[in-house]
Amino acid sequence: MSIIAPPSSTGQRLTPPTARRFLAVFGPGIVVMLADTDVGSVITAGQSGAQWGYRLLLLQLVLVPILYLVQELTVRLGIFTGRGHGELIRENFGPVWAWISACGLGIATAGALLTEFSGVAGIGELYGLSRGLTLPIAAAALLAVVLTGSYRRVERVAIAVGLFEFAFFFVAWQAHPDAHAIIVGSLDIPLHSKAYAYLVAANIGAVIMPWMIFYQQSAIADKRLRPEHLPAARWDTAIGAIVTQLVMAAILIACAATIGQRTPDATLNTIGEMAQTLTPFLGTTVGNAVFGAGVLGAGIVAAIVVSLAFAWGLGEVAGYRRSLEQRPFEARWFYGVYAICVIGGALFVGLWPDLVSLNVAVQVMNALLLPVVLGFLIALARRALPRGQRIAGAYYAAVLAIAVMTCLLGIFGGLSGAGILG
């Protein structure tokens, strides 16, 4: 599946950037996409494979260009305005709408942090480590990474940790899936099933999340990328979109080829349950160690990105200093909000461990937030960008149609699966 970028403002065909320029720009797209495959997404993909075999695999591939389309608009807004998402909403639509967007971001952030810390705690429990030990260590590590006053350092650490997600490819290979079953199963789509529609909504919400838009746009502004960096930034985002969906597909395939074949009714509400259910099929090493490495990478990088997205987004709306290039005492509110997110998330999961059952519901909630998220994004792409970069004509019509269909699919699936729609 290819990803085609929209035409450039000069009318020239976009070509791959030089290696030097790509490495200079490389980062925000890869980081946000690695964070996209967070703990909640892992559980959603796992349940999709266990309950429906390969029937939701095609959706993972269809979501690649949609994910790229959304984040490419974010890239353009960050590069051509030099401002974060919340700041642009405030400037173009007023403080009320800016605070509404910040509230939506806050809800998504809270749900995401619960899933990330639940995953970290679940992996620790596989090895007999209590939450009282693993959660404080994870929180301390997350604080240490960011309290350095350097965006580049945070980005490098996030990428290094996120690469552990590649362990899921090994897990899928060890599951020995049947190629013919994958092809046949992916084309068998039970359109009339409410349970299937609910997981469709969850998968959409697991891919397009409010905090991704806030993070990537603010990261691009913090990194001070300029218009000449646009082609490289698009490639950074495109590569990330493909990688994150391949990871989701690998998790789905691994669970479909093992749990889905023999114990499709298995409970997979937590990472611990998922790893233990995979162990009889994959062995202890792959089921616990390799799978655990992937989950830890996903959870840690997502916790960094989600917390920074909220700290940036709230700062853009409230007006406090917000940059990783400033020291903690220079931007105390920014670092303070980040610290509150991290410490609060760890405490919540430590005190109310049963909240991990909300993992899939959190992804459905993200799908229900899509009309607000995509509505602001498209409106800003029409209003805040310079004229040569605004989406218009056939491309605007295509973007609008895809956004509307994605929102309707997510809302219908979420509400019908929850029993609200008949």
Image (tube, rainbow, N blue to C red):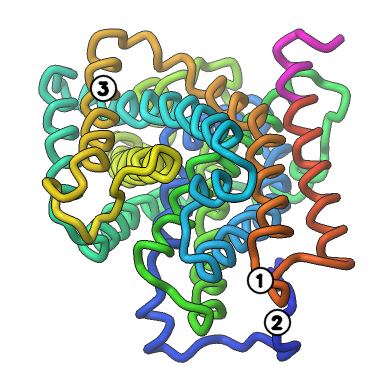
Quick one: label 3 or label 1, which is nearer the N terminus? 3
Relative to 187, is 242 above or below?
below
Name the one closer to the observer, 319 or 227.
319
Question: Can residue 348 be seen by looking at this rendering?
Answer: yes
Report x, y in % for residue 88: 55, 51
Circle 1: element type = loop
Q: Which residue occupies 58% across, 46% down? A: 89
Instruction: From the top left corner, tell me how far across and down residue 296 is, in percent.
Output: 29, 40
- Closest to the camera, between mark 3 and mark 1, is 1
The crowd level at tag 3 (other Cα within 10 Å; few <14, some 14-19, many 20+) is: some
Q: Which residue is mark 1?
A: 386
| Residue 353 on the magenta span | no
Position of 75 with respect to 413 (left or right) is left
Q: Nearer the viewer, residue 129 or 211?
A: 211
The image quadrant of residue 410 is top right
Disc marking residue 89? none
Magenta highlight range:
413-422
Q: Which mark is residue 9?
A: 2
Mark nearer the N terminus (1 vs 2): 2
| Amino acid, disc 2 | Ser
Q: Quadrant of the N terminus?
A: bottom right
The C terminus: image quadrant: top right
Numbered disc 2: secondary structure: loop
Q: Is residue 280 left or right of residue 146?
A: right
The numbered dot on residue 344 is 3
Q: Callout 1: 10 Å neighbours few (<14), some, many (20+)?
A: few
Left/right of residue 96 with respect to residue 284 in the rendered view: right
Question: Gap between marks 3 and 2, in whole Å?
Answer: 44 Å
The answer to whether mark 1 and mark 2 are in CB contact below 8 A is yes
